[in-house]
Image (cartoon, helix red, strand yellow):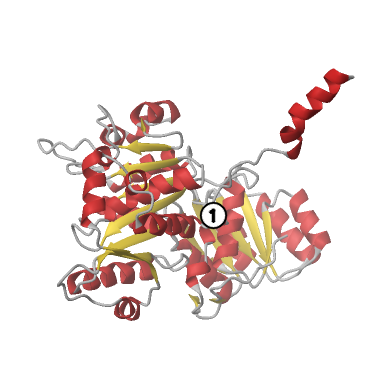
Amino acid sequence: MSQQSKSPLEFDPESGELSDGDQAEFRASDRARPIPRISIQAFCDSVSVANAVQYAADDRRLSKAHVSVHMGGISAAISHYVDSPTPNLIIIDSALGGGELIAELDQLAESCDPGTKVIVIGRHNDVVLYRELLKRGVGEYLVSPVDPIGLMEGISNLYNNPDTDPVGHVFAFVGAKGGVGSSTICHNVGWTMSEVLKTDVTIADLDLPFGTAGLDFNQDPVQGIAEALAAPERLDDQLLDRLLTKCSEHLSIFAAPVLIDRDYDISAEACDLVLDVARQNVPFVAVDLPHDWSPRSRRVLLQADEVIITAAPDLANLRNAKNIVDLLRASRKNDSKPHLILNMVNLPKRQEITVKEFEQALDVKILSVIDYDAETFSQASNNGQMVAELSPKAKAVEKFHDIALKITGRKEAKPERSSSFAAFAPILEKLKLKR
């Protein structure tokens, strides 16, 4: 039996909106996982619950599901399914309690097809009622008032094993303008995540004709992400291993073909399928998006767990970054705000827009400010190295380190210390010999 817990963003059940809050700390994706392609029908007694269900239906985690909301509660559901097949999931909102609710559910069960799951939203925090519902095969019982995140979590737990590790996080890196260094930041932050956190990371280069992941990591793979996108339905764990290029113990790249004599008619759905397989195999997927506005780029931005926008401190970047932030804010109401990085700051003789002006215009706290350092960055690029490999003491190295920890919400993996017993082992051996 689930009761609603408060989150930094509070849901107003009457208006069907989230109130203002500290959205930067709001990581609903850690609890509610993406829902598979299922049909969901909700029958609600109260408008507030109907609003919560509709709000959840608009979330990216339910983008593959088909959701319909009806009023009338359990009696409307019973009447509806007399002549209609039941969907994959029925959500029942009812003010009834005890025996009345059980009797109505028993009547509804007579019309349910095998495999149909049921979530009940009730008004009574009653353990006895909860146990009776479980005996009858009800998947989850939520106590009203219900919020969209709690509802999505309940649905997610029915179709994803809550005891298993969550699927990997997808980080979408995009430039507010071409040439601002989004790819460089994506690659350096991805490499830093793999080295500092000692966890597996895959960098997916979606700039198919002009991608730089292969160059930046000094790799020249024969196959890569284009082969996966061309036939996404064939991609499985074994094929994924063959298409990925191993760069270090914990880092692999999904390299772009970098060929301009072919057309890349790649659908947004193909990107979804490929990234879904990738995120099932590694904890972190960093997606290097090209500076275009194709359906696939838009889909990745809207579906990613975290979005990192890189901008230079000028007016065009400010305008473009604001457009992207506004779109994400309107389309991703249950997600944290996108992260913003100001890159190539303090370029000599250039008039720049300040950090404060960026933050005020976008209503986003700047995640990091990286100074202009042409010598270090260009040499690292020409060598096929990350900045930390070329110059560990460069100022940008610490920035990449901080960015990696902040966007993942993780702490740095500490090296294992040898135990005191191991340190005294040689002495103990000598004492044994003397005996």
Classed neighbour count for the residue bearing mark 1: other residues with Cα under 10 Å, few (<14), some (14–19), many (≥20): few
Counting every numbered tag in the picture gives: 1
Residue 244 vertical position relative to residue 350 in the rendered view, above or below: above
Taking depth in this image into account, of 119 and 396 the one nearest to the observer is 396
Residue 223 vertical position relative to residue 298 in the rendered view, above or below: above
Q: Which residue is mark 1?
A: 410
Secondary structure under the numbered disc 1 in the rendered image: loop
Expressed as whole percent of the image width and height from the top left, the position of residue 208 reads: 21, 42
Tell me if 63 is positioned left or right of 300 in this view.
right
Q: Residue at x 18, y 57 (%)?
A: 179
Q: Residue at x 81, y 61 (%)?
A: 127
Residue 233 vertical position relative to residue 112 in the rendered view, above or below: above
Q: Residue at x 40, y 53 (%)?
A: 171
In this orientation, does residue 241 appear? Answer: yes
In this orientation, does residue 289 appear? Answer: no
Taking depth in this image into account, of 202 and 412 the one nearest to the observer is 412
The N terminus - image quarter: bottom right
Residue 278 location, quadrant: top left
Expressed as whole percent of the image width and height from the top left, the position of residue 243 reads: 34, 29
Tell me if 9 is positioned left or right of 205 in this view.
right
Residue 59 location, quadrant: bottom left
